[in-house]
Amino acid sequence: MSGLSATIRVARQSGFVLDVAVVASRDATVAILGPSGAGKSTLVEALAGLVPIEAGQVDLDGRVLDDPRTGVFVDAEERRFGVVFQHYALFPHLDALANVAFGLRSSGMNRRDADHHARSWLDRFGLGEHGRSRPADLSGGQQQRVALARALASEPDVLLLDEPLSALDVATRARLRKDLARHLASFDGPRLLITHDPTEAFTLADVVYVLEGGTVTQMGSPEDIRLRPTTPYAADLGGANLLEGVASLGIVSCSGHPLVIADRTLDGPVLITIRPEAVVLHDVQPEGSARNVWRTVIDEVEPLGDVVRLALAGPLPLTVEVTKESALSMALQPGRSVWASVKATEIGVAPDGS
């Protein structure tokens, strides 16, 4: 196949086991999204050839890079992976130009040509005037661009980015995300983005793999993950609410609380998703088209810029998002009693095959 295909099993001495299958075509950016301890670093090391796999196979454009059954193992320096590490791993004693040229010279290019090639990459990233600056003299954003230029200068077959924005402050991260998206789109090959940040995954990737506890729990487009999560972790990533229930004749019982849904054909265990903005809060019991109305208490309040995220107590522990103006006008705060409503058509329901 054209692209990267990897089936990987690696067991750590701690007892942790990574057992995943990942496919990345040449025209796609694939994000591996997971919490700390999910196995993301182990996956990076296995793909890059820093650790051999115990079972499975790593294949790039039909070339086997790692296969324990046949004894094939291609060393890291021969895999042609351009890697951008979480903290960039720039050589502190080398200036930006020498850092970018390092891989080129290691591959046998003479110093003059390597420096010329490296300088052209620094120019592309708007760093031409910083060629003689050492990493300590560069900002976090500039260091990130030097690391990306170094990875791309060697013309790799695969671009592997391990938490490329996590070392930056929030403002810089938001600004460079657009630049990174442009550079990823211009790279002609598989792009793998390893991240714990759902914003990075959802805005930069074409395909998202959710990694939990060493296994892939969900794979799909960013929209699939956000709107149709299959685990509580995935639901929390997109801010969606994920509930389990039992459906019968258009009603789902969730922990004893009935919810009217639009689909009357479902019968048996189901997964329910409710977007935070789909839940409407009221001072008094509402009248209207909403079929699902109940009284609840606000448990937590978290301001998030122009919106406020609320956690509701029972009977349904939902996350709700309202505008800052609504939160102020209704005096929404922990302990406040309110009415909640959600339309049947705003409730996503799918059979629970677990």
Image (cartoon, grey):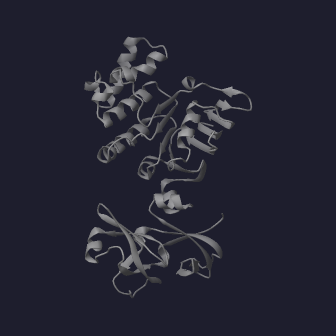
Which x, y percent locates residue 264? Answer: 60, 79
Q: Which residue is at 62% across, 25% downward?
A: 74
Q: Quadrant of the N terminus?
A: top right
Q: Residue at x 41, y 52 (%)?
A: 199
Q: Which residue is more in the foreground, 150 or 338?
A: 338
Describe residue 214's horizontal placement relative to residue 165 as left or right: right
In screen coordinates, is 57 left or right of 78? right
The structure residue drawn at horizontal position 44% and vertical position 19%, both measured from the top left corner, is 104
Residue 22 showing in the rendered view? yes
Q: Is residue 175 left or right of residue 201?
A: left
Left or right, 101 with respect to 216, comes to left
Residue 211 in the image: x percent, y percent? 56, 50
Residue 341 falls in which quadrant of the image?
bottom left
Task: Tell me what residue is drawn at x 48 percent, y 32 percent.
Answer: 83
Expressed as whole percent of the image width and height from the top left, the position of residue 150 reads 41, 27
92 or 138, which lies in front? 92
Q: Answer above or below: position of 168 versus 243.
A: above
Task: Give the quadrant of residue 133.
Answer: top left
